[in-house]
Amino acid sequence: MNFNQLELLRFLQETNFNLSKAGDKLNVVQSAASRQIQLLEEELGSSLLQRVGKKLVGFTPLGDKILQEIEVIDLARRNIHSIARDYKNNRNGTLRIATTHSQAKYFLPESIGQFRVEYPQINIYMVQSSPDQIIDLLHRHQAELAICTEKLDEDEKLVILPCYDWHHIAIVPKDHPLNRDHITLEQLAACPLLTYSPGFTGYSNIEKAFHEAGLTLDVTLSAADSDVIKTYVRQGLGVGIIASTCYENKNDRDLAVIDLSHLIPKSRTKIAFLKQLYLPGFLQYFIGLLQAKNNLNT
Amino acid sequence: MNFNQLELLRFLQETNFNLSKAGDKLNVVQSAASRQIQLLEEELGSSLLQRVGKKLVGFTPLGDKILQEIEVIDLARRNIHSIARDYKNNRNGTLRIATTHSQAKYFLPESIGQFRVEYPQINIYMVQSSPDQIIDLLHRHQAELAICTEKLDEDEKLVILPCYDWHHIAIVPKDHPLNRDHITLEQLAACPLLTYSPGFTGYSNIEKAFHEAGLTLDVTLSAADSDVIKTYVRQGLGVGIIASTCYENKNDRDLAVIDLSHLIPKSRTKIAFLKQLYLPGFLQYFIGLLQAKNNLNT
DNA sequence: TTGCGTTACGACTCTCGTAAGGATG
DNA sequence: CATCCTTACGAGAGTCGTAACGCAA
């Protein structure tokens, strides 16, 4: 048994059990991959892969169980390299942040700016994705850190830290009739609404508020990011509901802000990473920066 | 990086950083071991071992951190083999039980008898040891299961299950003046006492009972096992305090039993194993047997 | 001198890549 | 006939063991 054999199994799963592609990922040709799988199966005395004819179609139950252990090994191995790099006090490295447009554009820039002052040589990758996929990116080691509002709960393989709380606002053109204080949910529901797609940036809280008030949430236009919503609000399509953090004083002066904190429950954006992941110094520092900005009043 | 290099680090620790002996454990000569260590250090870019001259004397802080990850990898690798063996439904395998004399002789025989009926081909090793060492045996993969009364608490790497509760009894020759019902701790303390060595079989509870009553526990003779204690009680050296489970009706009829359950708190014997350890079918079965015998009334 | 770690070098094992073969849709 | 996996075989990389060396108790 060696690391490559185990990694091959991981790659097989990722490639839908295509031996050529899995081999590619390991930088070996198909035949080499084939033999390594055979050797491993021989060593363990049972087949790990379901075959239909010669084609590989999935894991056997045994293979499935073993894959779980392989993932433990894989993470530990990554950690070893990570620890070694950290101890060399190399201030270079890679920070991959899986997050949504909203966070990437409105919340993170300040923290990342501060971070670059301290660690100018770290390569930062913003991996933008939908909240569903963000968690998957962590599990698949495509990102070290996830910053996200929705879908970040009850994953026992993740550490989840609160980051900051915020509430929703409505945005309308200045001359819109809704532009005044203390509106009600009914008044809001009567307007054509523009907001986030389900699963994004506190959508579930908007839905919950409407549902509990016995109203139907009828969204005229939904989008994954606030900028798209703003654009259509400017075109007069209706009332936009976005995160308060996504309103920019300097650029959005033409839009009026209507507070909705009394209508829609606050949302909490969280930080997540794999529980067993070794956190290099720079990562701990970055997490510290994010949390320092918090306004949590639990 | 490969498994042997990582294992070598583990072996170095076990051999007090003697490269020849560590190499032996891997079945390679010293020079090969030396080179593999160098290759690993080169790959990671830092030294993992403290050297005085050429002699290895310990890990660097980096090496120490990495060793923790290596232990994760090591266990996962054992699990892979263990899972594979389990799935072949090979009813052979090895069950190593780390326990004390008391458990091995008086509690376990029945369970092991039942176990052998179901799994006649499993090799059972009883690894007898002091409670301190028993836990160490688990960590060092010298035993899968520990059965023990003392010292089994608050180890976050262990799963600890209650097994059974029992209380202490006093044993005396039939004609001993203490041989009657409802004795007090003071009466007991006035006699020469023979009981377990500190750390064995509920000793801490005996100590606690005496201490709370303001009495000094003055042990005339202490031993690690009940049989030694019985022997000296028979010679008239004094009053023996042993676990109730260690009194055998058929062999110990010459000794009178004095109940102490009102004087000394009950003791709980527990089962322990490594948290991340894969439990093959036979091991789960054996644990089930042990727990089926329980008399727990929490 | 013995014990321990490192270095040098030839032998061997293991794994790879090329290429050919067989199965499947 | 294109795709995918397996098998055969020679080339090359990697690891090992022997042996010689350096160093310290």
Image (cartoon, coloured by chain):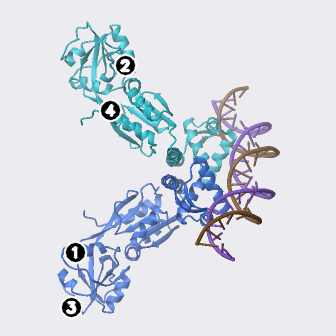
Chain colours: A cyan, B blue, C purple, D brown
**Number of the front mark, 1 or 4:** 4
Mark 2 Cα-neighbour bin, 10 Å: few <14, some 14–19, many ≥20 = many
Q: Provide the residue designation for mark 4.
A: A293
Q: CA distance from mark 1 to mark 3?
A: 24 Å
Q: Amino acid at mark 2?
A: Ser
Task: Residue C25: name its quadrant.
Answer: top right
Residue at 55% from the left image edge and 41% from the top image edge? A10
Q: CA distance from mark 2 to mark 4?
A: 21 Å
- Chain designation of label 4: A
Q: Residue B155: where, in percent of width, then height?
A: 37, 59
Q: Provide the residue designation for mark 2.
A: A226
Judge if badges 3 and 4 mark residues of a common chain: no
- Chain designation of label 1: B
Of labels 2 and 4, earlier in sequence is 2
Q: In the rendered view, does C9 fall on the left or right side of A70?
A: right
- Chain designation of label 3: B
Q: Residue A177: where, in percent of width, then height?
A: 22, 8
Q: Residue A105: where, in percent of width, then height?
A: 40, 23
Q: CA distance from mark 1 to mark 4?
A: 53 Å
Judge if badges 2 and 4 mark residues of a common chain: yes
Task: Residue B261: name its quadrant.
Answer: bottom left
Q: Provide the residue designation for mark 1.
A: B211
Between A142 and A218, the residue placed more toward the observer is A142
Between A52 and A214, the residue placed more toward the observer is A214
Q: In the rendered view, does B22 fall on the left or right side of B130?
A: right
**Which mark is drawn over residue B177?**
3
How many circles with numbers are drawn on the protein?
4
Q: CA distance from mark 3 to mark 4?
A: 76 Å
Whether residue A179 is visible to the viewer of this picture, yes or no, is: yes
Mark 3 Cα-neighbour bin, 10 Å: few <14, some 14–19, many ≥20 = few
Between B57 and B86, the residue placed more toward the observer is B57
Residue at 28% from the left image edge and 89% from the top image edge? B238
